[in-house]
Image: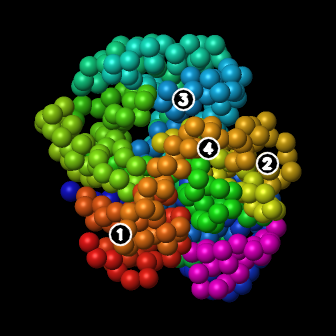
Amino acid sequence: MKQESIFLSSVKMPQFEGLREDTKADVVVIGGGIVGILTARLLCDAGYDVLLLEADRLCSGQTGNTTAKITVQHGFCYADIAKRYGNGGAAIFAEANRQALDRYRDMARGVDCSFETRDFYAYEKKDARALERELEVLCAIGMKASWELPQELPFPTVGAIRVPGQAQFHPVRFLAAQLGGIRICENTPVVGLFAGGAVTADGKTVRAKHTVVATHFPFLRWRGGYPFKMYQSRSYVLALENAPLPRGMWADGAGKGVSIRSFDGYLLLGGGTHRTGTGGGGYGVLEEFAAARYPGANIVARFAAQDCMTLDGMPYIGAYAKGLQNVYVATGFGKWGMTSAMLSAMILTDLIHGKSNPYSAFFAPSRQIPPLRFLRETGAVLKHYLRPTVPRCGHLGCALRYNKQEHSWDCPCHGSRFTPEGKLLDAPAVHDLKKAPRK
């Protein structure tokens, strides 16, 4: 069984040298995942000299470990958005994501990336009222959506919301075709920012008029308050062969069950979600599900990723923080990083170009956070500081937990991850642990 994403194992990304000397650019983009590459692509097309810096290899983080569904329906999100921002806010969210989907269609033309138009279904196992509330808002804002009784799922539900004309693709192949004309440095971790640029781990500096932080979780410790208004959630994927393949893409509307899509003759089964650094979920949940629901199938690959979860369910796209001039961020995509990544690239390109964007204020990182959700998240974080255990995360000192399934030390506060030897795996930490931890 492969312990690597089928997207990463099926394509070889080009390699780039690390940054060897101080340099300058119009825009420095920090992070070589889908957000960084798309933002660099759109800025380069707009005539900017762009330098993209990646700490490891391109697409080696979360991007290559996704299930790669592109959809405007992000689970049962519209009822919640309408409750806080009215149907007008829900309509803005829908139109913004629709434009991102359309941009993918345009850019995927002529690219060998398995781009396919598919209907998307958000199902509900028990709560029919949740389906009704979501569908009421979708109909009110004019989205093409309908209540369906699922025929492709191997378990009972009370129904699903069908949104036609969405898409799925091979994200790494798509991104490999977007690199032309972009200056790229791999194995170049950035550890700090200064007025007008960035500094790398080995002391090289990049001077730039604009800086885009596309590092999944923003790495500056306090600026912007991201550690207080976001956390990370880990989820898992199995690739199955000899399993029936669905025509559509499926996901639990409440985000608690499994997601299903096909790719290249395989069934991709996603789920096992849990907050990074806490128990529960994992590959075992999916393996039990596959054995029970697809008894004739074989597991050929498994891989995992984690998602930044905001407290109001919408991404942060725009100015990083007050006092940081010309520094921008894109983060907090939940489980819907593909659509949100393109939306981020479009908004950030307009902001840097000085062009008005109708969606920038709606997704601004400075927007007000629901106070009760903020208090709950603060409590969830503080309890991990009270644990008198070592090791502790170098980001903000939270007590780490050992992840037996993936053999890593994980931070339950903000999602940093380290190998058993203390090597950094995932941000927001920017350094290895000072010494190898003991289990």
Residue 106 falls in image quadrant: top right
Do tag 2 and tag 1 residues touch (Cβ < 8 Å)? no
Please give the residue where the numbered disc 3 appears in the rendered image.
Answer: 77
Query: From the viewer's perspective, is residue 362 above or below residue 4?
Result: above
Mark closer to the chain start, 2 or 1: 2
| Mark 1, secondary structure of its residue | loop
Going from the N terminus, do you reach mark 3 or mark 4 first?
3
Q: Which mark is residue 389?
A: 1
Instruction: Calculate the distance from the C-alpha at mark 3 to the C-alpha at mark 4.
Output: 12 Å
Magenta residues?
189-209
Residue wearing tag 2? 350
Q: Earlier in the sequence, mark 4 or mark 2?
A: 4
Q: Nearer the viewer, residue 252 or 409?
A: 409
Residue 246 visible in the shown view? yes
Q: Position of residue 23 (x, y in %)?
A: 74, 80
Tell me, for residue 315, which label it has, or none: 4
Real-space Cα separation, disc 2 to disc 1, in angstroms: 46 Å
Please report the residue visible at 61 percent of the width from the left and 66 percent of the height from the top: 221
Element at badge 3?
A: loop
Q: Which corner quadrant holds the N terminus?
A: bottom left
Residue found 46% across the figure and 49% down from its top: 380
